[in-house]
Amino acid sequence: MNKHRSGFVNIIGNPNVGKSTLMNAFVGEKLSIITSKAQTTRHRILGIVNGDDFQVILSDTPGIIKPAYELQSSMMDFVKSAFEDADVLLYMVEIGEKALKDEAFFKKIENSKIPVLLLLNKIDTSDQEILEEQIQHWQKLLPKAEIHPISALENFNVKEVFDRILELLPEAPPYYPKDQLTDKPERFFVNETLREKILLHYKKEIPYAVEVETEEFIEDEDIIRIRSVIMVERDTQKGIIIGHKGSALKRVGVEARKDLEKFFDKQVHIELYVKVNKNWRNNTSQLRRFGYNS
């Protein structure tokens, strides 16, 4: 019999390099929201991949930035924690990138005692010459890291990277029940799905001033009834979120409902409200309430 392997595989990198796309590709489910905007991921999200003789606990983290307010500091705490419990570190960069946005984090990767796989993503947007230049660039910067060119979006080399992860994991029993997909509750995925739609449909500061809280999640045999509140920081933002005669808010609700029905494989009824929660991004007690700074 094969011995059982288990471990924590943490994905870090700059904003928008494809971390969430990669984790969803590994897990086979949409656990992390994906948009073209920076700072889409705010939390550390676990995705668990199980086999007969393995359990890979993947961790998607916020993109590395220099924090400008309390929320962003909390997001960077999630990244710091990813260094502490990793058995394998996936450092993700994209074609054309030269360095991490935070020198201190880069030093941690450089000095890492655990295996580091540097994943050079979005190679489908490049040619062979540029790819070879990039591989040489990163080999000089991180000589101890293994470099794997991939395209998370096109699923190129993703299986090969996963197989390599399995080889690097320690022998250990599973940390989570074998039928568990993530460490997050249902309400978390409702909040994130709504936030994704807001990131897609609103411009400028609006998506970054928004937090979502699901106050009610009632699951019956054939339907899930959800009531969620969209928090904004100012009255003007509330008006923009709602839109003319409620049209903008309705669009968010309709699109989120469709995604949630796929995710839960059940009919969903969703009610949305918008409230002003002034300056929540710099309020530590509010951030704790939303699952940050914990």
Image: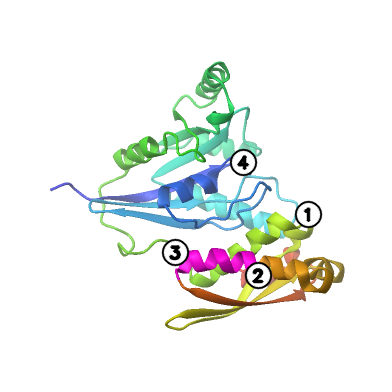
* Element type where label 3 sits in the image: loop
Q: From mark 1 to mark 4, how far is it between C-alphas? A: 21 Å
**Residue located beneath label 3 in the image:** 183
Say whether residue 293 is visible: no
**Residue located beneath label 1 in the image:** 203
Label 3 environment density (alpha carbons within 10 Å; few <14, some 14–19, many ≥20): few
Label 2 environment density (alpha carbons within 10 Å; few <14, some 14–19, many ≥20): many
Membership of 119 in magenta stretch: no
Query: Left of 122 or right of it: where is 101?
Result: right
* Element type where label 2 sits in the image: helix
Q: Residue at x 29, y 58 (%)?
A: 174
- Look at discs 1 and 4 and give the one toward the viewer: 1
Q: Residue at x 56, y 42 (%)?
A: 18
Say whether disc 2 or disc 3 marks the residue closer to the N-terminus.
Answer: 3
List x then y, in percent, for residue 178. 30, 62
Residues 142 and 195: in front is 195
Say whether residue 213 is visible: yes
